Amino acid sequence: MLKVTVVCENTVGTPENLVGEWGLCLYIEKDGRKILFDTGEQGNLLSNAAALGLDLKQVEALVLSHGHSDHTGGLRAFLRHRGRLPVYAHPALFTSHYSADKHRYIGVPFCREVLENAGADFVLTREPREILPGLWVSGEIPRETPFEKPDNKLYCQENGKKISPDPLLDDLSLYCVIPEGLVILLGCAHAGLVNIIKHARKVTGVSQVYAIIGGTHLGPAPASQQEAALTFLQGLDLCLLAANHCTGLPVIARLASLFGSRFRFAPAGSTFTLPLQED
């Protein structure tokens, strides 16, 4: 069994005394073991998890999808609560990420030393890694799909040099294999949704994509890229597409129209138990 609970997201979908915040945090339960994927922006994962009846002290590993503050802002609060544990991420996690909007710094809001003192044992990898049986950290995702371009509103700085657009090589996803097929869990999909899916198939050896859950980053994408990605998604025999966060409400509406009952909006408080049970 695989169970995914949305702990933090831009919006709240259940009357459970939850707080919405821009960002994402997923609580993943697989065969009785618990993994956390991202930490949201402001630390509300602690109170939200308690309201949802989730014990963060049982989490045995944390995976960070990339080094943006809306996915890492709750790190210190989580580590102080949970204590020492492995934290999987890309080696470029601490890149100086910026938004062109007012030239704001949007990278990890804590230095590595502070997080290590709080309990983070960083496991930085560019290669795919199986962290639980059938659950993979993607590693660095090859950028091969011609129509998937970096977000021009984002840039980074390395050695005092501005790089625009930000390649966001630290963008990771999670791949989970269940008997029914492949479940792909997205943080922000900066690497490109199609690139991520193709890489998942290669890493796991499983071609059937059963479910996709998380942020697709289609909201900020140009219309041509949105349409090409939607066409690709329609070519998959998906049983569940649960989008949120950076997908954006207009694209979410399109996905709901295209996928019908196979689509679910995934605000904070949403829970998905896979495989899906027949009504």
Image (cartoon, grey):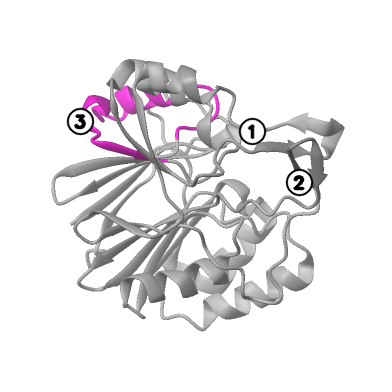
Residue 116 forms part of the magenta stretch: no
The answer to whether mark 2 and mark 1 are in CB contact below 8 A is no
Residue 44 forms part of the magenta stretch: yes
Which residue bears the numbered disc 1?
Answer: 107
Q: Is residue 164 left or right of residue 261?
A: right
Residue 179, horizontal then vertical, whole percent: 20, 72
Which residues fall within the magenta stretch? 39-63
Give the Cα distance between marks 1 and 3: 27 Å
Q: Secondary structure at mark 3?
A: helix
Name above or below for residue 9 compared with residue 31.
above
Residue 45, horizontal then vertical, whole percent: 41, 26
Name the quadrant of the C terminus: bottom left
- Circle 1 residues within 10 Å: few <14, some 14–19, many ≥20: many
**Residue 101, quarter of the rendered image:** top right
For the residue pair 269 and 196, the one nearer the viewer reads as: 196
Q: Amino acid at mark 2?
A: Leu
